[in-house]
Image: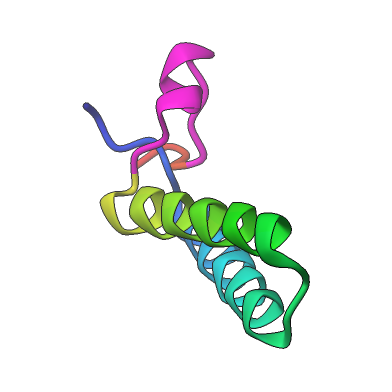
Amino acid sequence: MKKNIGKTDMIVRLVLAALLVILYFIGVGKLLGLIFIILAIILVLTALTRTCPLYYIFRTDTLGKK
Protein backbone atom coordinates (compact mmCIF):
# COMPACT_ATOMS: atom_id res chain seq x y z
CA MET A 1 0.00 0.00 0.00
CA LYS A 2 1.22 3.48 -0.89
CA LYS A 3 2.20 5.94 1.84
CA ASN A 4 -0.58 8.46 2.47
CA ILE A 5 0.22 10.02 5.86
CA GLY A 6 2.22 13.22 6.10
CA LYS A 7 4.64 14.24 8.84
CA THR A 8 2.13 16.36 10.80
CA ASP A 9 -0.50 13.62 10.64
CA MET A 10 2.10 11.10 11.84
CA ILE A 11 3.04 13.27 14.83
CA VAL A 12 -0.62 13.82 15.77
CA ARG A 13 -1.26 10.07 15.65
CA LEU A 14 1.75 9.34 17.88
CA VAL A 15 0.73 12.02 20.41
CA LEU A 16 -2.85 10.70 20.52
CA ALA A 17 -1.55 7.17 20.99
CA ALA A 18 0.62 8.33 23.89
CA LEU A 19 -2.36 10.08 25.49
CA LEU A 20 -4.48 6.95 25.15
CA VAL A 21 -1.77 4.85 26.80
CA ILE A 22 -1.50 7.37 29.65
CA LEU A 23 -5.27 7.23 30.14
CA TYR A 24 -5.06 3.44 30.22
CA PHE A 25 -2.47 3.50 32.99
CA ILE A 26 -4.40 6.12 34.96
CA GLY A 27 -7.18 3.56 35.15
CA VAL A 28 -10.26 4.40 33.12
CA GLY A 29 -11.92 1.01 33.48
CA LYS A 30 -11.23 -2.37 31.97
CA LEU A 31 -13.32 -2.17 28.80
CA LEU A 32 -12.52 1.45 28.03
CA GLY A 33 -8.85 0.82 28.80
CA LEU A 34 -8.80 -2.11 26.38
CA ILE A 35 -10.40 0.03 23.68
CA PHE A 36 -7.82 2.77 24.31
CA ILE A 37 -4.91 0.32 24.00
CA ILE A 38 -6.29 -1.14 20.76
CA LEU A 39 -6.75 2.35 19.31
CA ALA A 40 -3.24 3.34 20.43
CA ILE A 41 -1.75 0.30 18.70
CA ILE A 42 -3.61 1.12 15.48
CA LEU A 43 -2.49 4.76 15.64
CA VAL A 44 1.16 3.80 16.21
CA LEU A 45 1.14 1.22 13.40
CA THR A 46 -0.42 3.62 10.91
CA ALA A 47 1.96 6.40 11.97
CA LEU A 48 5.09 4.28 11.67
CA THR A 49 4.13 2.73 8.34
CA ARG A 50 2.71 6.09 7.17
CA THR A 51 -0.23 4.29 5.58
CA CYS A 52 -3.88 4.53 6.58
CA PRO A 53 -6.33 2.05 5.05
CA LEU A 54 -9.23 4.48 5.52
CA TYR A 55 -7.33 7.20 3.68
CA TYR A 56 -6.71 4.67 0.89
CA ILE A 57 -10.42 3.75 0.68
CA PHE A 58 -11.50 7.41 0.57
CA ARG A 59 -8.59 8.35 -1.75
CA THR A 60 -7.23 10.90 0.69
CA ASP A 61 -3.69 11.67 1.72
CA THR A 62 -1.91 14.18 3.91
CA LEU A 63 1.47 13.87 2.23
CA GLY A 64 0.97 16.88 -0.01
CA LYS A 65 2.84 17.51 -3.22
CA LYS A 66 6.53 16.64 -3.50
Relative to residue 42, is residue 13 depicted above or below? below
Query: Residue drawn at (78%, 72%), measured in percent from left and top?
Result: 28
- Magenta span contains residue 55: yes
**Residue 15, x across and y down, in percent:** 59, 72
Q: Quadrant of residue 26?
A: bottom right
In the picture, the quarter occupied by the N terminus is: top left
Instruction: Verify whether residue 57 appears in magenta.
Output: yes
Horizontal and vertical percent position of residue 19: 66, 75
Q: Furthest residue to the right?
A: 28
Q: Which residues are magenta?
A: 51-62
Q: Residue at x 58, y 58 (%)?
A: 34
Pick the residue in front: 6 or 29. 29
Q: Residue at x 31, y 59 (%)?
A: 48
Between residue 28 and residue 40, name the one nearer to us. Answer: 28
| Residue farthest to the bottom, as pictured | 26
Point out residue 55 in the picture as x, y percentages from the top left corner.
Answer: 49, 26
Residue 18 against residue 65 in the figure, above or below:
below
Left or right, 12 with reference to 56 = right
Seen as rendered, the residue at the extreme front is 30
> Residue 46 placed where, x, y %?
38, 48
* Picture colour scheme: rainbow
Q: Nearer the viewer, residue 38 or 4?
A: 38
In the picture as drawn, the residue positioned furthest to the left comes out as 1
The quarter of the image holding the C terminus is: top left
